Image: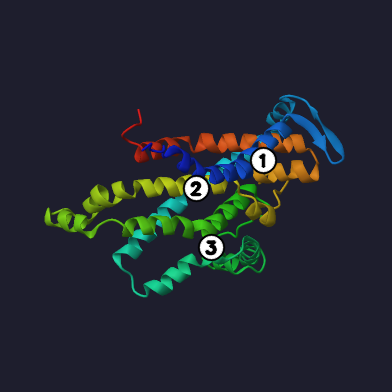
């Protein structure tokens, strides 16, 4: 009796998924790339201009300012989140009293909409009547002039983003920590390993894949940072706190330069991939160590 190849049924199962991914990801991405090669606006038919949009965007000093601001915020947010998430995951895994209540408190920021969070933080850090401003003054510290001083505006954006998205990193690392078998710690303790040695020899190596995944996702999410900056500073003062997503929004919807906005979008993708390249490479080796060169 002739045996049927398993390839055809497998293709039948995965074809709808591949088609779905192609429709919602690759086709829009290809359309945006084509748009980046044209000059177009409202009521204007696209005109092919080659790489002129990329040259114009790369010659714009506001683009480079937005890129530097984005890289600074992303590096601060991702690495501080990782350290805080790792510390909290180890603390919860070691056993803390009232764990369900504390878990709810830690996860609460993820349930708050970004708009509500920004409004709340604007009120807290209001230079005149904000509770956080009054607390800083009581401690003898100067208030954050986030609406006037650009680096203080970026600092507040970073703190807000960390507060909003820390639960994401925490949940990944906490789940990975709980998945580590307790027998490994018992064996290490019987061998006389100290608490730090158990962390360095057992916990940290087994958490590396989860840490890489968390950092990779946070790099992607943080590079798309928009609402925190737009609602908090609006990119000001004098466009000094703009990030790439805000720059793209202004090009597309304030200046109606769709070609420049599309080129900015692709440059944003390239910049995020370059910044996350080391993590992608490390993640590839962790997951496919046998075949990686």
Q: Which-is-in-front pick, marks 3 and 1?
A: 1
For marks 3 and 2, the one nearer the N-term is 3
Task: Say which of 19 and 32 sits in front.
Answer: 19
Mark 3: secondary structure:
helix
Q: Are marks 1 and 2 in contact (CB under 8 Å)?
A: no
State the image coordinates of residue 293 (x, y, percent, origin top left): 35, 27
Mark 2: secondary structure:
helix
The residue at 61%/63% (across/down) is 113
Q: Which residue is mark 2?
A: 217
For marks 3 and 1, the one nearer the N-term is 1
As displayed, is residue 53 above or below residue 210?
above
Q: Which residue is mark 3?
A: 110
Q: Alpha carbon of mark 3 to alpha carbon of mark 1: how far?
A: 29 Å
Camera sees residue 243: no
Q: Residues within 10 Å of mark 2 (few under 14, many from 20)?
A: some
Q: Which-is-in-front pick, marks 1 and 2?
A: 1
**Direction right: furthest residue:** 43
State the image coordinates of residue 261 (x, y, percent, origin top left): 72, 38
Task: Say which of 128 and 255 sits in front.
Answer: 255
For marks 1 and 2, the one nearer the N-term is 1
Label annotation for residue 28: 1
As displayed, is residue 43 above or below residue 231?
above
């Amino acid at each position: 009796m002739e045996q049927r190849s398993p390839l055809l049924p497998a293709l039948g199962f995965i074809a709808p998924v591949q088609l779905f991914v192609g429709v919602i990801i690759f086709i829009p991405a290809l359309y945006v790339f084509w748009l980046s090669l044209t000059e177009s606006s409202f009521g204007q038919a696209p005109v092919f201009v080659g790489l002129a949009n990329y040259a114009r965007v790369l010659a714009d000093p506001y683009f480079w300012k937005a890129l530097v601001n984005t890289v600074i915020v992303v590096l601060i947010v991702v690495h501080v989140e990782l350290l805080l998430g790792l510390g909290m995951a180890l603390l919860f895994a070691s056993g803390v009293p009232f764990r369900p209540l504390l878990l709810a408190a830690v996860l609460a920021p993820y349930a708050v909409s970004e708009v509500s969070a920004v409004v709340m933080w604007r009120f807290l850090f209001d230079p005149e009547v904000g509770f956080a401003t009054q607390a800083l003054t009581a401690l003898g510290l100067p208030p954050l002039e986030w609406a006037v001083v650009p680096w203080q505006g970026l600092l507040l954006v970073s703190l807000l983003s960390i507060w909003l998205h820390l639960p994401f990193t925490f949940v990944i690392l906490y789940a990975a920590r709980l998945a580590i078998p307790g027998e490994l710690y018992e064996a290490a303790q019987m061998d006389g390993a100290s608490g730090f040695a158990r962390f360095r020899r057992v916990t940290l190596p087994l958490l590396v894949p989860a840490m890489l995944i968390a950092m990779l996702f946070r790099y992607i999410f943080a590079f798309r940072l928009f609402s925190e900056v737009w609602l908090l500073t609006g990119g000001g003062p004098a466009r000094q706190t703009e990030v790439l997503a805000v720059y793209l929004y202004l090009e597309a919807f304030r200046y109606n330069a769709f070609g420049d906005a599309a080129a900015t979008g692709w440059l944003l993708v390239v910049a995020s991939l370059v910044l996350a390249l080391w993590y992608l490479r490390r993640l590839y080796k962790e997951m496919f160590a046998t075949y990686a060169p």
